[in-house]
Amino acid sequence: MDLQLIEAYIPKKHFEKVSETLSEFPIVSNWVSRESEERKLVRVLVETKNTEEILNYLENASSVVDGFEVMLFPVRSYLTRVTEEEKEQIHREEQEAKTKIQRASRHELLGAIEKSSRITLNFTLLVILSAIVVTIGFIKDSEAVIIGAMVIAPMLGPINSMAFASILGDFRLLRQSTATLLYGIGIVLAIAISLSFVLPVPIENNEFATRTHVNLSDIILAIASGTAGALSIISRLSDALVGVMVAVALLPPTVVVGMTVGSGLWQEAFGSGLLLLGNISSVILAAIIVFSLSGIRPVKWKDVDRAKTSRKLSILFVSLTVLFLILAILFSSHIDLI
C-alpha cells in the first residue's frame, strides 16, 4: 500500500469543522496534537490515490483561513496489523490500479513542474555543456558522445511545464516555461553557430545528415518521447533516462540548425528547423494528452472554465501543427518518388 502523510496546522476556532470534514474522507489513520494555544496539528495517514482529494479540500480551506498550513510527506514504511478483510481490499485495489494511469497528486506535480520551468544557473550550465558535447559528437560522428550529451540536457522540464500549464489554464506558468524553453534553445543555437565558424560542419557524417530533414518516423519518435516524459512526471519517477529520449528529439536538431545557419547551408537549416518544430509540437501534444487522461484539473471553480478552454485550444493548435508537418512530409516524399 502506497501511503503519504498530510500534516495540517489548523486554527483552534476552525478545528472542529475541519476535523469533522476530514473524517469523511477515506483515511488509514490520524492523530491530533495541540501545537499552541491558537492552533492544533492534525496528522492524516492516507493512501496516495486519496491524497489529492484531501489536499483539494485543505487547499480551499487554507485560502480563506489565516494561520492554516498544510504539508505533505512520503511514507517509506508503515507497520500495523492487517486483517484478512483488509488484505482482500488491498488486493482488489491493486487489481483496479492496473487499469488506470497512476499519478502523484496535482499539488506534488505542480511543485515539481514549477521548479523545472524556471531559468536557473544550473539549467544554463547544463544547456551550455550539453550543446558543446553534442556538437563535438556530430563532428566526430559519434553516437555515444551524442547520447552522453543528452544525459545532461535539461530539456524535459520546460516542455512538460508548458503542457501542464495548458491543462490547468495557468498562463503565468505557460509564459514562464515557454521563456525557459526558448532560452535553452537560444543558447544551443548560439553555441552551435559560434562553433560552426571555427570547426568543420560535418555535413557528410551520418549522425548529422539524418537531422537535416524530417520524416514520419521522427514525429513518431517525438510523440513516444513526449508520452514517456509525461508519464515519468506524473509517476514522480526519475526523469534522467526519459530525459534522454526527449533530448533525442530536441537537442540534436537544434544543434544542426545552428551549425547549418552558421555555415549558410539554408536548405539543410530549413529541413532541421522543420524537424525541430515538429519534435517540439509532438512532445507537447503527447504530454497534454497524458496529463488530460490522468485527470489533472484545477480545483477552484473560477479556474475550471479557463482550464477547459486552454486545454482544447492547446490540443487543437498543436495537433494542427503536427498534422501540417505530417502532410508536408508525405507530400515531399511523393514528389521525391516522382
Image (tube, grey):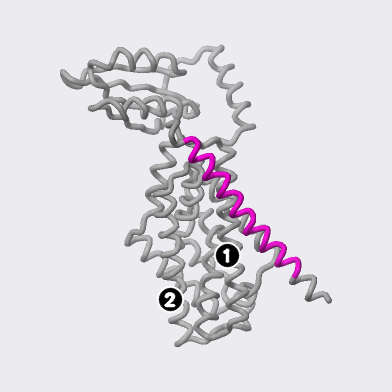
Q: Which residues are magenta?
A: 304-331
- Inspect the image, locate mark 1, and give the three-letter code of the amino acid beneath it: Leu
Residue drawn at x 30%, y 27% as measured from the top left: 64
Residue drawn at x 27%, y 25% as measured from the top left: 65
Q: What x and y, as percent, mark residue 249? A: 57, 62
Residue drawn at x 61%, y 50% as measured from the top left: 316
- Inspect the image, locate mark 2, and give the three-letter code of the amino acid beneath it: Ile
Quarter the C terminus occupies: bottom right
Q: Nearer the viewer, residue 165 or 156?
A: 165
- Element marked by disc 2: helix
Is 243 drawn above or below residue 88 in the view shown?
A: below
Residue mark closest to the camera, 2 vs 1: 1
Q: Which residue is mark 2?
A: 191
Is 178 drawn above or below residue 201 in the view shown?
A: above
Q: What x and y, as percent, mark residue 17? A: 32, 14
Q: Residues within 10 Å of mark 2 (few under 14, many from 20)?
A: many
Q: Nearer the viewer, residue 314 or 250?
A: 314
Q: What x and y, as percent, mark residue 154? A: 44, 59
